[in-house]
Image (tube, rainbow, N blue to C red):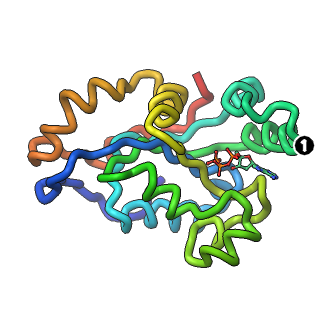
Amino acid sequence: MFTTKKRLLTARSMAKVLQLTLAVIKPDAVAHPLMLEALHQRILDNSFVIVRCKDLVWRRQDSERFYAEHSGRFFYQRLVEFMSSGPMRAYVLAREDAIRHWRDLMGPTKVFRARHTSPASIRAQFGLTDTRNTTHGSDSVESAEREIRFFFPEFCVEDWMKKEEPLFRAGQIQYDLQKLTHTLAPHS
Ligand SMILES: Nc1ncnc2c1ncn2[C@@H]1O[C@H](COP(=O)(O)OP(=O)(O)OP(=O)(O)O)[C@@H](O)[C@H]1O
């Protein structure tokens, strides 16, 4: 699936504590291999470490559950249908201040606004509409934990922060992109 060369990611030079965030490449972008590749490369180029990665498909009820806070809004049905319309790619990303950096990189939710205020952002460059806006990112530490659990139920943020983060920062663990899961699977 990945066409970039095998990369071994190491954190030897990282001094500060890493933060985790959930990033998702939505179905509109996954549907276009070149766009998917460009977004994947954007992640690597911005010093994010890919801790976990998987391709998955949501059932309608997964989409409804994840976006429950928006139920009743005019775009809710459109959003739910879109997010369960095809494969997505989800990442657990680590870096210093990961939540803010990924959200800055995505740009504003609305594509029109993104094009005016943040022309270099992902949504400005690749977004199609306010709903089909290519990417998702957690907006707080609490939502990152909740959303990582939603997408990666087998992954424990607390354990990672306690056990793996210090080892990783000390260069004692490496993440090999080739070994991360990217088998297409229905949401569990
Ligand atoms: N006004 C709108 N019109 C159409 N779709 C919208 C609108 N507002 C939000 N959405 C869709 O709902 C998603 C969730 O909205 P939210 O307000 O949480 O934005 P966000 O935090 O920027 O996006 P995300 O949660 O996907 O990172 C948006 O990413 C977009 O796909």
- Where residue 154 sits in the image (x, y, percent)? 41, 22
Q: Quadrant of residue 43?
A: bottom left
Placement of 158 over or under 9, stated as above or below: above
- Where residue 182 sits in the image (x, y, percent)? 46, 42
Q: How many marks?
A: 1
Q: Quadrant of the C terminus?
A: top right
Residue that lies at the very extreme toward the right in this rendered image = 74
* Residue, disc 1: 74
Residue drawn at point x = 17 percent, y = 56 percent: 14
- Where residue 64 sits in the image (x, y, percent)? 75, 28
Q: Looking at the picture, tell me which residue is in the foreground, 185 or 24.
A: 24
Q: Is residue 161 left or right of residue 84?
A: left
Q: Quadrant of residue 86?
A: top right
Q: Looking at the picture, tell me which residue is in the foreground, 67 or 173.
A: 67
Mark 1 Cα-neighbour bin, 10 Å: few <14, some 14–19, many ≥20 = few
- Where residue 145 sits in the image (x, y, percent)? 45, 30
Q: Looking at the picture, tell me which residue is in the foreground, 68 or 50.
A: 68
Q: Looking at the picture, tell me which residue is in the foreground, 102 or 43.
A: 102
Residue drawn at point x = 47 percent, y = 32 percent: 142
Residue kind at label 1, given as amino acid type: Phe
Q: Is residue 150 left or right of residue 41?
A: right
Placement of 87 over or under 14, stated as above or below: above
What element does badge 1 sit on?
loop
Residue drawn at point x = 53 percent, y = 32 percent: 147
Q: Is residue 153 left or right of residue 29?
A: left
Ligand 1 closer than 8 Å to label 1 CB: yes
